[in-house]
Image (spheres, helix red, strand yellow):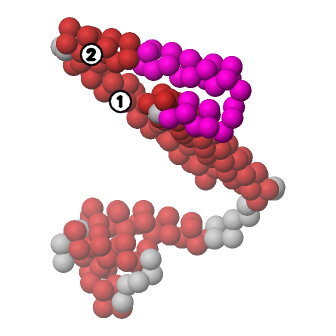
Amino acid sequence: MNCKQSCDYMMKYLDSELSDSEHAQLIHHINKCDNCCAEFQQYNSIKKALEEDEEIEPPENFEIKVMNKIKAIENSAKLIKEKRLVILYFVASIIFSLGIIICSVFLKDYILEFMKYVGVPTGITYTIYGILSNIGYMLMVLIRLIYCFNSMYSETYYVFLGLFVIAAMSKIYGNNEVKCKKDESVDVLQNE
Ligand SMILES: [Zn+2]
């Protein structure tokens, strides 16, 4: 038997999984090898100490404290979830409204005809038509501006791309930090 095998056997011994013949082999090696002998004595004293302290009483209120901490962690997770849901709804409703406005701008002539057909008062009909026309005009200006910017500063795209990557990285890094903090709180919980 070599020292590595002997180490494996010691681990098995600690778990009380050593057969009689394996035990004999281990003792045989330990008698010859000073290093393993010292190691075995250390393990043995730890094993004995653990067996004596098997019935460790948890401190008072331990369960209540743990439950409170778990509840606190769960609540904060719930809060984060709810916040995300609200943001998601908000973004979705903005995108939806924008979609409807853009569609209305494209279909403004049909909407005008429809309002006339249904019998909406002329004042309101033309006010709505005017607003839609203005939005359409602003959209056109915006698209032109983007187009101009695009042709003039096509290199700046890379700068924006770089900034975007940095922003994304810092976001991911921030999330990791939060996650680490959470893990730490779990550790504290386990240590108490
Ligand atoms: Zn050895």
Is any atom of residue 98 visible in this view?
no
Task: Give x and y (percent) for residue 76.
Answer: 67, 43
SS at mark 1?
helix
Is any atom of residue 21 visible in this view?
yes
Classify 101 as above or below 137: below
Q: Can you say which quadrant of the picture contains the N terminus?
A: bottom left
Q: Is residue 45 left or right of residue 38?
A: right
SS at mark 2?
helix
**Viewer-closest of 97 and 58:** 97
Q: How far is disc 1 from disc 2 in space, using C-alphas? A: 29 Å
- Ligand 1 contact, mark 1 (Cβ < 8 Å): no
- Residue at 27% x, 64% y is 34
Classify 136 as above or below 5: above
Q: Residues within 10 Å of mark 1 (few under 14, many from 20)?
A: few
Q: Is residue 133 magenta?
A: yes
Query: Can you tell which mark lies on residue 150?
Result: none
| Region in magenta | 110-139
Disc 1 residue type (three-letter): Met
Q: Which residue is identified by label 2?
A: 147
**Viewer-closest of 179 and 17:** 179
In the rendered structure, which disc, 1 or 2, sits on the residue that comes first in sequence?
2
Task: Give x and y (percent) for residue 74.
Answer: 67, 51
Task: Give x and y (percent) for residue 13.
Answer: 40, 78
Q: Which residue is identified by label 1?
A: 169
- Residue at 50% x, 64% y is 46
The rendered magenta stretch, by its main secondary structure, is classed as: helix
Q: Is residue 125 magenta?
A: yes
Task: Give x and y (percent) for residue 60.
Answer: 81, 56
The image quarter in which residue 91 lies: top right
**Viewer-closest of 12 and 157:** 157
The image quarter in which residue 7 lies: bottom left
Disc 2 residue type (three-letter): Tyr
